[in-house]
Image: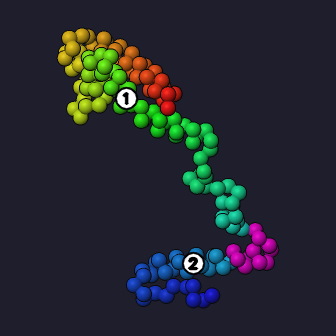
Amino acid sequence: MKDRYLRSGNGVPEAIVKEYNRMIRHERYVEYLDRKYGLIHTNFDKVLEFNPDPESLTETKAEAEAMRRHKARLKCIPIVLDRLMQDSEQDYQIIYHFYLADHRLTLSQLADKYGITKEAVRYRLKMLRGKLKDLIIFYEDLE
């Protein structure tokens, strides 16, 4: 087991060699205590068998269903935006310029562009978000 120790002069800094060798001595001491008194130190591989890492767990049915629903809703967005454009070009333009455009407009800029108050734009955005949500759910249920 002596071959596990690092030797200085291999291009490894002396402080790292000392720390590594200290850890090896401690590991050997823990193994000695385990042999002498029975297993008293935790084997982390066995701990992971009973308490697995959350990242390695498979999805629950609820999470899988939520992910499926999310993906279905993302597929519906282009259909819903087309439907909104057919219903009202101005409503589509408000949504587009506020959320989707490369250069997004503020509430004040939208109010100036459409000749309405800023509060009216805010109200229309709130109503349009509700309408979009309802349309997405409707088209999601069709699939």
Q: Which residue is mark 1?
A: 79
Residue nearest the viewer, comparing 48 with 102:
102
Tell me where the magenta segment starts and ends, as one range.
Answer: 30-40
Quadrant of the image containing the N terminus: bottom right
Determine if the magenta segment contains residue 37: yes
**Going by the picture, which residue comes out furthest to the front?**
142
Structural crowding at the residue carrying mark 1, measured as other residues with C-alpha within 10 Å and reported as few (<14), some (14–19) or many (≥20): some
Q: Position of residue 4 (x, y in %)?
A: 57, 85
Horizontal side of 50 relative to 98 (left or right) equals right
Q: Which residue is mark 2?
A: 22
- Residue 133 drawn above or below residue 30: above
Residue type at tag 1:
Ile
Residue type at tag 2:
Arg
Horizontal side of 58 relative to 107 (left or right) equals right
- Residue 26 drawn above or below residue 126: below
Q: Secondary structure at mark 1?
A: helix
Q: Is residue 69 visible?
A: yes
Residue lying at 43% horizontally and 22% vertically, measured from the top left: 135
Horizontal side of 133 relative to 29 (left or right) equals left
Q: Earlier in the sequence, mark 2 or mark 1?
A: 2
- Residue 123 drawn above or below residue 97: above
